[in-house]
């Protein structure tokens, strides 16, 4: 996926934290995936 450049600068302060928060949470989800697989 390729994102287009933002054309409205006012949105930067609202949307810039979103990818940062997503990166911080990546790989740190709660739970044990192996345990989940055993329950299925």
Image (cartoon, rainbow, N blue to C red):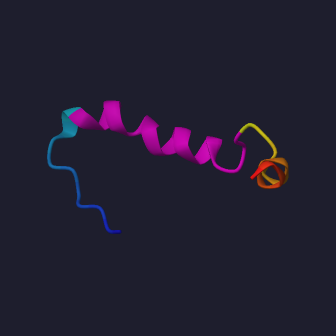
Between residue 10 and residue 27, name the one nearer to us.
27
At a point 70% along the width and 50% down the height, the residue shown is: 27
Which percent across, then down, holds residue 10? 20, 32
Q: Is residue 6 left or right of residue 2?
A: left
Image-based side of 16 in relation to 7, left or right = right
Residue 36 drawn above or below residue 1: above
Residue located at (33% from left, 31% from top): 13
Predominant SS of the magenta segment: helix
Residue 4 sits above or below residue 16 on the image: below
x and y percent of residue 11 in the render? 24, 35
Magenta highlight on residue 9: no
Q: Is residue 16 above or below residue 6?
A: above
Q: Residue furthest bottom?
A: 1
Q: Is residue 40 above or below residue 18?
A: below
Q: Residue at x 74, y 53 (%)?
A: 40
Q: Is residue 20 on the magenta stretch?
A: yes
The residue sitting at 34% across, 37% down in the picture is: 15
Left or right relative to 8: residue 2: right
Location of residue 26 in the rendering, given as x and y in whole percent from the top left corner: 64, 49
Taking the image as shown, residue 23 lies to the left or right of residue 19, namely right
Quarter of the figure with residue 4: bottom left
The range drawn in magenta is 11-29
């Amino acid at each position: 996926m390729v994102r287009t450049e933002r054309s409205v600068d006012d949105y930067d302060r609202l949307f810039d934290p979103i990818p940062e928060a997503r990166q911080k949470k990546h790989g740190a989800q709660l739970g044990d995936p192996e345990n989940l697989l055993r329950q299925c």
